[in-house]
């Protein structure tokens, strides 16, 4: 919600008036001082129209809604209290307490894009940027939340069949924002200290082309339609498609024993498991590698499906602290820690090898990919504990 600053107003005053923590208002406006006539954003609020009734005044309207009268006055600075006209419209501030991300089934790139922009508009302390693009030119969107020195990275949908991981991430972002602006705990944990201690980097959908192919079919592939149909043996059922639009498995693209995978996996584009002709040939994998190199993440979590396991080691490069962290993740989720797996060249593998920092692959849910959406509530409940723990550990 936007307001115009009056002479003498401060962000500290707005924090008290709207009951929003000052760090969130400062981050939403990227400053700590404001001046008269400037536009300021109040995160977590929407402006809604109200039609003036008989005998209305700012004071009576505020009293009926149990809010400070100055909240209303700020939004209606061109109105004069004693000259409100019956039938005319003014604006009222409404604090958002409910999720705005609700349609999470068959979660396409376009749904994610729309929801992220709604979130960033309502909660402008959350920022979005593109870190690169998919083969088809879709922006790989990174979300950043928090202003702490501890940098934690989270990603989802490396595989097209695993779009439900993006649904989990978007709901978590939305719930975290609501918790922050309403100063309500998540699972009995106060979230503002987490926001001030950690900066969360999130790439919710690493493989948008593959996700859309799984959900929408070959028409979504546009100029690549003939290619994906050929790779898929001319079947328009792409429910088994893990790869990017070029038939390369993005989570087998990283230089961490890549040759081992290349020697035992398909040698040409496939719906799944083809690691490419070389490591880091695909734009999506290159963007993710560059992101990690630029940011110095303290910790990395990659969300996949399925198995209810957490993979946390790679060839002995993992630091000792990883075991303590994964045990906490297991405790809050019920997932089983697995140190080593006969699988290589993944993003988590490369991160551990490259930086010797804790990296984790979370295998959400049970069954056959893509997991049925009926599992979503329990998947989210278990994953939320891990995501919170990643911020306070």
Image (tube, rainbow, N blue to C red):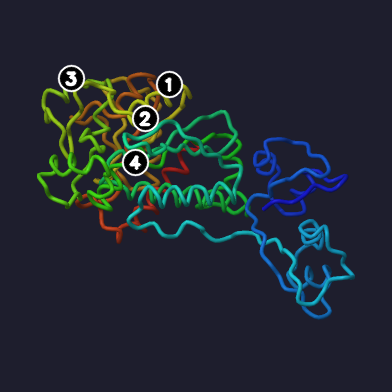
Label 4 CA crowd tier, 10 Å (few <14, some 14–19, many 20+): many
2 or 4: mark nearer the eye: 4
- If you read the primary sequence from the N terminus, does the residue marked by circle 3 or circle 1 appear first? 3
Residue farthest to the front, as pictured? 223
Camera-near label (1 vs 2) is 1
Q: Position of residue 96 (x, y in %)?
A: 60, 59
For residue 359, the mark is 2
Q: Give the mark toward the camera: 2 or 3.
A: 3
Q: Which mark is residue 303?
A: 4
Q: Position of residue 153 (x, y in %)?
A: 44, 33
Look at the picture and state if 120 lies above or below 206. below
Residue where numbered disc 1 is placed: 293
Residue receiving disc 3: 259
For label 4, the SS is strand
Measure how far apart labels 1 and 2 are at the Cα level: 14 Å
**Circle nearer the viewer, 1 or 4:** 1
Circle 3: is it few (<14), some (14-19), or many (20+) Cα within 10 Å? some
Rendered residue at 32%/39% (across/down)? 207
> What label does residue 114 carry, if any?
none
CA distance separating discs 3 and 4 = 24 Å
Question: How far is the residue under mark 3 from the one under mark 1?
Answer: 22 Å
């Amino acid at each position: 919600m936007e307001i115009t600053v009056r002479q003498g107003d401060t962000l500290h005053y707005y924090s008290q008036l709207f009951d929003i923590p000052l760090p969130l208002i400062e981050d939403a406006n990227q400053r700590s001082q404001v001046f008269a006539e400037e536009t300021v954003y109040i995160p977590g609020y929407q402006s809604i129209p109200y039609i003036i009734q008989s005998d209305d005044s700012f004071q009576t309207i505020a009293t009926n809604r149990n809010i400070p009268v100055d909240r209303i006055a700020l939004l209606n600075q061109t109105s004069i209290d004693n000259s409100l006209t019956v039938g005319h419209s003014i604006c009222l501030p409404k604090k958002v307490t409910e999720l705005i991300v609700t349609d999470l089934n068959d979660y396409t790139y376009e749904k994610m894009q729309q929801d992220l922009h709604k979130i960033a508009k309502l909660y402008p302390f959350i920022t979005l940027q593109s870190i690169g693009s998919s083969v088809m030119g879709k922006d790989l969107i990174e979300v950043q939340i928090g202003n702490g020195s501890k940098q934690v990275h989270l990603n989802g949908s490396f595989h097209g069949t695993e779009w439900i991981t993006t649904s989990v991430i978007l709901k978590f972002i939305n719930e975290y924002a609501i918790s922050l602006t309403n100063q309500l705990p998540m699972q009995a944990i106060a979230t503002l200290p987490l926001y001030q201690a950690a900066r969360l980097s999130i790439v919710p959908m690493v493989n948008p082309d593959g996700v859309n192919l799984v959900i929408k079919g070959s028409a979504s592939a546009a100029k690549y339609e003939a290619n994906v149909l050929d790779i898929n043996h001319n079947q328009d059922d792409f429910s088994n498609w893990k790869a990017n639009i070029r038939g390369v498995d993005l989570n087998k693209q990283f230089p961490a024993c890549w040759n081992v995978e290349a020697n035992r996996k398909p040698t040409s584009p496939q719906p799944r498991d083809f690691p490419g002709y070389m490591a880091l040939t695909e734009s999506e994998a290159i963007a993710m590698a560059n992101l990690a190199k630029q940011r110095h993440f303290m910790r990395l979590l990659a969300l996949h499906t399925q198995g209810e396991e957490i993979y946390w080691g790679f060839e002995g490069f993992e630091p000792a602290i990883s075991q303590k962290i994964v045990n906490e993740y297991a405790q809050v989720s019920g997932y089983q820690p697995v140190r080593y797996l006969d699988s290589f060249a993944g993003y988590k593998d490369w991160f551990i090898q490259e930086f010797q920092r804790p990296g984790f692959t979370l295998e959400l849910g049970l069954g056959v990919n893509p997991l049925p959406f009926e599992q979503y509530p329990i998947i989210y409940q278990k994953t939320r504990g891990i995501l919170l723990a990643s911020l306070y550990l």
